[in-house]
Amino acid sequence: MFITKDKKFYKTLITLAIPMVLQNLISFSVGFADNLMIGSLGDSAVSGVYMGNQIQTVLQVISVGIEAGILLLSSQYWGKKDTESIRKIISIGMIFSVSLGIIFTTVCALVPRQVIGIFTNEAAVIDNGVEYISVICYSYIFFCITQALIASMRSVESARIGLLVSLASLVTDVALNYVLIFGKLGFPALGVRGAAIATLIARILETAIIFIYVRFYDRKLRFRFSLILHPDRSIFKDLVKYGLPLVAGQLVWGTNLAANSIILGRFSESVITAASLANTVNSMMYVCMNGLAGAVGIIIGKTVGAGDTSKIKEYSRTVQILFIVLGLLTSAAFILIRDPFISLYDISADAVYYSKQFITVLCFTCIGTCYQCGCLLGLVKSGGDVSFVFKNDAIFVFCVVIPSAIVAYLCGASPWVVYLCLKCDQILKCVVAFFKIRKYNWMKNLTKQVTEQS
């Protein structure tokens, strides 16, 4: 039997994936709304917001590591229906998340120009980027709190609240963008700063909604925020032990994304603008794939935690096929939307030219992205092998991706060649994923140690 015939698997996958994918798409749409509306202000504004959002991207990448730690342990304990341990995990995860948000907010508030200067030396781009992050940085704490709580709810299969939170955020952000960017309803036209203010208000609303839900409406966990003041030591050790490789892996990935921006930021303003557009298209794909991989991860984690490992081989074969198909469909979609998407922006002819090249590169690499992420994130990481993905990413990023892109840039290669070097790991990691899955040595029940200690 090549794929599973377990109807419960498909039912659970759909039930979890739909709200998670929709939530991710809506969250993506918040940034896309900023990007698209700012697009009417020209290349410098688009590039400035793009560079400003690289800070948010790095924050989000690291935050995902904390969320993954919460999800990994909590979903396995959910398989045992041990809600008390899950509450302890969430309280410690919240401490880490809030601390992360405070660090990023402090740095960006104190030295915004130096932060943007890391990514580009274009004066006009830096000016717009500084104007943007000087406001948006205050949203980082709210973002981290919200994402940690949403991850907590996902771990116990309550995925719909994340969708509601993101939908409210999208409506708020788009409405305020229209008013504040362009100066409607008697407000002054604030441009880039207006987009940042709109997103800040939307982030505050997100946090308020998820806080109220967790405190007053959730009936599965009945989480008490007072637990944050009294972290459990044994759970703390396990979250650090199993979560640290996840955060380290995300730090590697964050370094990779920062290197992408720094290397491409050495090119002209039109190339930076093209990178912004290509990044938007790539993110559109990634949030869908990540939502589905997240749903797979919850199922795998719960199955391993419950001790029902006989189903894992069936599930793993099915997951591989699903994500290959998703990759092929995504590639076809990129080909179809490339030109219409670019036409939405009022950008220079050079920026259009480079955008077409970059998105064409993505048409190929997205197939690998879908397959290897489904395998490495949906199966291996969620199955309990928390260090493998970190080691694998580190090798590819520091030994292949960044060195090849730097060499290509120094040799005077075309921007699309450098961009391809920055994305080459998405194809190469498929080979590693293919053979790793077949070893089945990634199935590890991480709840055993805590059970023995207690």
Image (tube, rainbow, N blue to C red):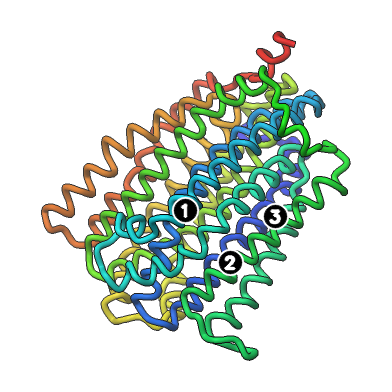
Reading the chain from its start, which is encountered first: label 3 or label 2? 2
Q: CA distance from mark 1 to mark 2?
A: 14 Å
Checking the image for residue 366, the label placed there is none
Left or right, 253 with reference to 447: left
Considering the numbered disc 2 on the image, is that residue within a helix, a strand or a loop? helix
Reading the chain from its start, which is encountered first: label 1 or label 3? 1
447 lies above or below 259? above
Q: Position of residue 298 (x, y in %)?
A: 68, 36
Left or right, 241 with reference to 207: left
Residue closest to the far bottom: 186
Circle 3 residue: 207
Point out the image quarter for the C terminus: top right
Considering the numbered disc 1 on the image, is that residue within a helix, a strand or a loop? helix
Q: Position of residue 83 (x, y in %)?
A: 81, 29
Nearest the eye: 326 or 357: 357
Mark yes or no: residue 277 visible. Answer: no
Amino acid type for the residue under numbered disc 2: Thr
Left or right, 95 with reference to 347: right
Amino acid type for the residue under numbered disc 1: Thr
Q: CA distance from mark 1 to mark 3?
A: 19 Å
Closer to viewer: mark 1 or mark 2: 2
Closer to viewer: mark 1 or mark 3: 3
Callout 2: few (<14), some (14-19), or many (20+) C-alpha neighbours within 10 Å?
Answer: many
Residue closest to the far left: 411
Circle 1 residue: 57
Amino acid type for the residue under numbered disc 3: Thr
Callout 3: few (<14), some (14-19), or many (20+) C-alpha neighbours within 10 Å?
Answer: many
Q: Quadrant of residue 278?
A: bottom left
